[in-house]
Amino acid sequence: MKVAVGEVVLPGDQCEEISLVGEKSKVILGPGLRKEVDGITITKAGTLKKRSPNTYWVDNYQKRYIPSRGENVIGVVVQKAGDIFRVDVGGSCSASLSYLSFEGATKKNRPKVNIGDVVYAKMLVASKDMEPELVCVDSHGKKGRLGVLEEGFVFKCSLNLVRKILNPECPLLNSLKNEWPFELAAGLNGRIWIKAKTMRETIAVGNAILGCEYLNTDEIKSMCTNIASILAGHVS
Amino acid sequence: MRDIFISNCEKSFSNKILSEGYRLDGRNYNESRQLSISFGSEYGSCIVSLGETKVLAQVSCEVTQPKQIRPNEGILYINVEISPMAGPQFEANRQTDLSVYLNRLLEKCYKDSKCIDLESLCIVVEEKVWSLRVDIKVLNHDGNLIECASIATLTSLAHFKRPDVTRSGDSVIIHTLAEKDPIPTVLFHYPVCATFAIFDGDILLSDPSFFEESVCTSSTEEGINSGGGVLVIGLNQYKELCLLDHSGAAINSSKLVHKAITSAADKCKEIVDMIKKSIVSDDTLRQKRVKINFADMITQHHLLALTRKDLNIKLKSYNVDDNRSEIDGMDTDHDLSDPEPSKYDVVASAPHTAEIQTKKESSKWIEISSDSEEDEKE
């Protein structure tokens, strides 16, 4: 079936619009699109989106992470193997994290990372034929916000939800931060780490994040005040 | 099978909140998730869902030769299948420890407790008996598979009806459903399993979620399991014990088991009552010749709203509907003009199928412009 931008598309559909644009200029194909001999074929079910001038992708509901370069992710250290840590990021295979890719780490000065620790790291290598590689420093050798996350709680959610709460137009985090203090790290692999003063406040943050998945801007704001009042004990 | 790895912070967090008296999804210690039973078009097929856990059960029968040692008894066979559909950690066509364990527990609960009148399944002694086969397929694994599968097994067995048989001399005639009314299976009693997760050796959680199950059975940093485990209790409607199974660290006090059995007794009675009620209501519908099948499960609400009533992480008094109703109160006319805030509409087409069509009216959903969505990616 022939489809256009903004429509609901299914795997196997063809998009002529993209191939026409592609004849004149360069086109960037995002996730869910593939170039075949006879045009552009869709490989995922979702909505076809376009960002001017010529980037196309299919936006769909997804829970399984596919590593891609430059994304900040949250992983769990599952194994120490020689000079690398194996980190489970939720992809098809575990990612590797060298012990030298921490701030101030040398051959003699090893970072303190144990099995079962949660790390916030950046994807350095993500190719379809190789194991993904993570780093906990930026190009200047500074850790920034990356590194081992202490205490708190990690939960999984859909990839769309992470992108939604990270969107600057999403009011969730802005309205939540006025209600009570908390720390949060969102990995684009669908894992969110949260930490607040008390256990109940931590649960409330998780509740608010998961609850906002299908709500619009106004509803999110009212949900935040609702949760804050439950937390304060006004609602029994 | 690839194990799901639980991080240290998740373990310590869940242990801490449990000792403070909370559960992650806002339930009380002895509170179960929503149980729902729906029947398929044939006798003996049902889908049971317990929260997000879903199990399909199907009973089938065939005429076989009885076993040598039990020439006048029918045969009951239970088969459990866990496919990658249930969870990404499972592999296709491969028996895992979990499926073998589940199979054994169900056999203990239904075969060894002798709840089915196997002698009534005999047609000709030493020659022909009915063999009942229960196929359990796990559709989604979100914890407490044992309880969900046992409810599904019992419901499908109680719902199942086998074809009637007449013997004339040496020949045996099996009647079709149209010729003669089928015969229901005779159940002496209705055993159901209830699962409890044990934390710190003294906290009992009924109907544990997948996360709670994996935390309480996982080993701690020291490599030893500190007082965690899963306790399975099978009871029938007369509160008689049919099955007791425990995995994980040893239980210190017998009081814990007593406590679990007393709370399981009431729960099992409730579940059995619900099973009986749903079978009776299904039967009356079938007598009125109403067509029943799994398509009834997929309601418009499921397709359109995508909303999950249960969040994995929830405060005790949080209600998903609260946000909705507050908005409704603020601008009612907004809601009346377009009750479904969706671009698409579900329209019935052929019988038992539906298709999604684009709605004529403009949508009430906010279109997040693609530019802003891309910005945060960079």
Image (spheres, coloured by chain):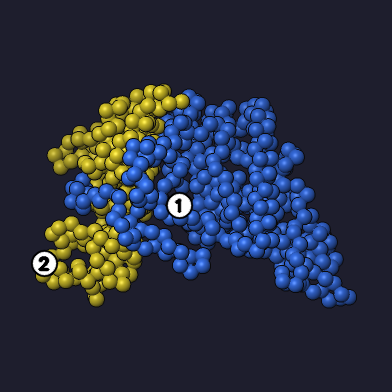
Chain colours: A yellow, B blue
Q: Position of residue B364 (x, y in %)?
A: 30, 50
Q: Residues within 10 Å of mark 2 (few under 14, many from 20)?
A: few
Chain ID, mark 2: A
Kindly identify the residue that appears in the image at 79 percent across and 61 percent down: B121
Residue that lies at the very extreme toward the left in this rendered image:
A24
Looking at the image, is B373 positioned above or below residue A39?
above
Q: Residues within 10 Å of mark 1 (few under 14, many from 20)?
A: few
Looking at the image, is B131 positioned above or below residue B151?
below
Which secondary structure, mark 2?
Answer: loop
Looking at the rendering, which quadrant does residue A205 occupy?
A: top left
The residue identified by callout 2 is: A25
Kindly identify the residue that appears in the image at 20 percent across and 36 percent down: A143
**How far apart are labels 1 and 2 at the CA level?**
44 Å
Closest to the observer: B347 or B361? Answer: B361
Give the mark toward the camera: 1 or 2: 1
The residue identified by callout 1 is: B301
Asked if labels 2 and 1 touch by Cβ distance under 8 angstroms, the answer is: no
Q: Amino acid at mark 2?
A: Ser
Kindly identify the residue that appears in the image at 61 percent across and 37 percent down: B231
Which secondary structure, mark 1?
Answer: helix
Whether residue B235 can be seen here: yes
Q: Position of residue B236 (x, y in %)?
A: 72, 42
Closest to the observer: A171 or B221? Answer: A171
